[in-house]
Image (cartoon, rainbow, N blue to C red):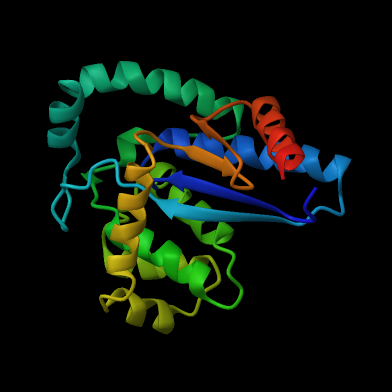
Amino acid sequence: MRDALTIDVVSDVVCPWCFIGKRRLEAALVALRDETPELPVTVRWHPFQLNPDLPPEGVDRRSYLEAKFGGPARAAQIYDNVRAVGRSVGIAFDFDAIERQPNTLDAHRLIAWAQSRPEGDAQALVEALFRAYFLEGRYVGDRDELALIATQAGYDPAVAQAFLGSDALRAEVRAAEAQAREMGVSGVPFFIFAGKTALSGAHEPATLLDAIAQARAAA
C-alpha cells in the first residue's frame, strides 16, 4: 500500500449535495484517522459547473428556479429533502436567502488559485464558499465578495483581489472541467480515491470508507 492517500473531489460551490458530500467525506476521514492515524491524506478540489451557460453576472434566482424546476413551489418540494439531509450532517441550508444564481467560474478559479499556492490546501476556502452561499445567501459570483470570502478563509485580501481581477487560471479551470466531463462525470459530487476507485454522489461515510479501502488495496 502507498504511504499517502489522495482524494480528488469534483464539485460545484452551488451544489447542495456537494456540501453534504463534503461533510460526509469529513466524517469518513475522521474514522480513517482513528484507524490509521499515520496515513497522510490530501484532498484536491476540481471544477464542475452545474450551470456553465449562465452569464457572468448571474441571473435572478426566481427566474432560475422557474426554468430549472418549473417554479419556486416545485423547487421547495425538492429542497425540503435536501434540508432534511443537510440537518443530519449539521448544515442549516437557507435556500430562501439566495437572491441570485451565480456563474461559478470565478469561484472555481479562486479554489484553483488556493491550491496552486505553497500551502496548497483549499479546504478552508471551499468550506467558506459553501457557507457563504448556502447559509448566508451571499452572491459568490461577485469578485469583491469572493475576495472577502477568501480573506475570511485566511488569505491576503489584496492578493486575492488582484488574482480575481486577472484572467489567471481561467483556461486551466475550463480545461479541468472539460476533462472531467470527458471522463464521464455528469453529476457531482464525484470522488476519486487514490486514482483507483470512484464514486458519484454524496454517499454515507461507510460507503466512502469502503471505496477508500478498495483503492488502498489496489495501490
- Residue plotted at (57% across, 59% down): 124
Residue 88: x and y in percent read 60, 25
Q: Nearer the viewer, residue 90 or 118?
A: 118
Residue 189: x and y in percent read 46, 37
Question: Is residue 151 visible in this depiction of the protein?
Answer: no
Q: Nearer the viewer, residue 30 or 175?
A: 175
Left or right? Give the position of 137 relative to 127.
left
**Considering only vertical position in the picture, is 187 above or below 10?**
above
Residue 93: x and y in percent read 44, 34
- Among the 4 quarters of the image, the one containing residue 28: top right
- Among the 4 quarters of the image, the one containing residue 159: bottom left
- Residue plotted at (15% across, 57% down): 57
Residue 182: x and y in percent read 33, 44
Q: Residue furthest front?
A: 218
Question: Is residue 124 visible in this depiction of the protein?
Answer: yes
**Considering only vertical position in the picture, is 130 above or below 197?**
below
How many numbered dots are placed on residues in this image? 0
Quadrant (top left, top right, bottom left, bottom right) of the C terminus: top right
- Residue plotted at (46% across, 25% down): 83
